[in-house]
Amino acid sequence: MADYLQNERLSPLMSVMQNAARKASRSLLRDFGEVEHLQVARKGPADFVSRADKKAEEVIIENLRRDRPGYSFLAEEGGEIIGSDKTHRFIIDPLDGTTNFLHGIPHFAISIALEREIDGNPKELVAGLIYNPINDTMFFAEKGKGAFINDGTRGGGDRRLRPSRRDIFTDSLFATGIPFLGKPGHAKFLKELHQVMGASAGVRRMGAASLDLAWTAAGRYDGFWERGLAVWDIAAGVLICQEAGLIVESLSGGDVLETGDVIITSEALLGPLKERVS
């Protein structure tokens, strides 16, 4: 497969998913421009939900349901919606980086993944996208087809994602998330952070896990770790990273989508990173 693909070569499924994300992004961008006027409600400790979040989710589900009738959904705001087709389930985070959004920080994304049950086996991820409306950058992957980015450069073609090839820990840059108010694990995280930042080129905390995963797949970060993430935070990013050729594991064992304790990096850096965060 060439490094650059033309948009017309997107699969029908991926076209449907990208169309839903782009439509939802229009209202997000309008509300981001008037962030000081948003009606905001407390959903939990340091976990805010805005009408923009809910509106984007409604647009995504409406468009996906129209083009893939009967499919089930698992969405951050609306929870689980069981469709007549229980073998397919979209996993949706309509606004990853809500706190950034509500503080006027232009770093947030829409994340959509699709699980499919094949021949009675447990559902597996078959498609995923992460869309940054601020700079119109789309990261996406389908199982067995590789991972790509469309950021409007070089004629707007879809470019294959290439992870970093760094294999020296001291030269490597990592991303993570910090437990916020009300989440456990602060002391453990500070120990992990101390061990990683003291031996690497640095650690970044940008506030949107989906984009952290996408940027790791794109080689901007050399690895990522975080605990306690929700499935909608990571589903699309997990597939994108796997299709880019990275190793994805759960820090606590088992299925990473169930535990939410994720570590993603290259084979060369996996051992050194795990030693410092396990």
Image (cartoon, rainbow, N blue to C red):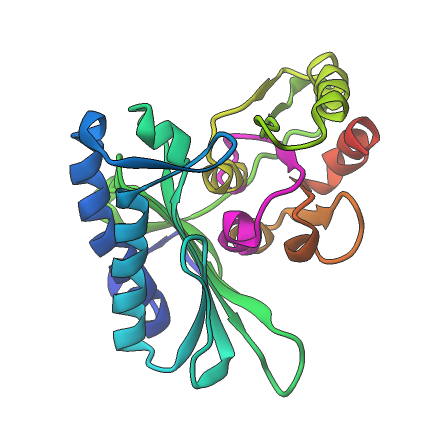
Residue at 28%, 76% in the rendered image: 67
Residue 230 magenta-drawn? yes
Residue at 16%, 30% in the rendered image: 34
Q: Is residue 6 visible?
A: no
Q: Quadrant of the N terminus?
A: bottom left
Residue 140 magenta-drawn? no
- In the image, taking residue 231 as reference, residue 14 lies left or right, namely left
Residue at 33%, 23% in the rendered image: 103
Image mark count? 0
Q: Looking at the image, which is closer to me, 243 or 183?
A: 183
Magenta segment range?
217-239
Q: Position of residue 104 (x, y in %)?
A: 29, 24
As drawn, 269 above or below 248: above
As drawn, 56 above or below 39: below
Q: Quadrant of the C terminus?
A: top right
Q: Looking at the image, which is closer to me, 186 or 120?
A: 186
- In the image, taking residue 139 as reference, residue 134 lies left or right, namely left
Q: Is residue 136 visible?
A: yes
Q: Position of residue 22 (x, y in %)?
A: 24, 53
Q: Position of residue 166 (x, y in %)?
A: 64, 29
Residue at 37%, 42% in the rendered image: 109
Q: Position of residue 199 (x, y in %)?
A: 74, 15
- In the image, taking residue 214 as reference, residue 20 lies left or right, namely left
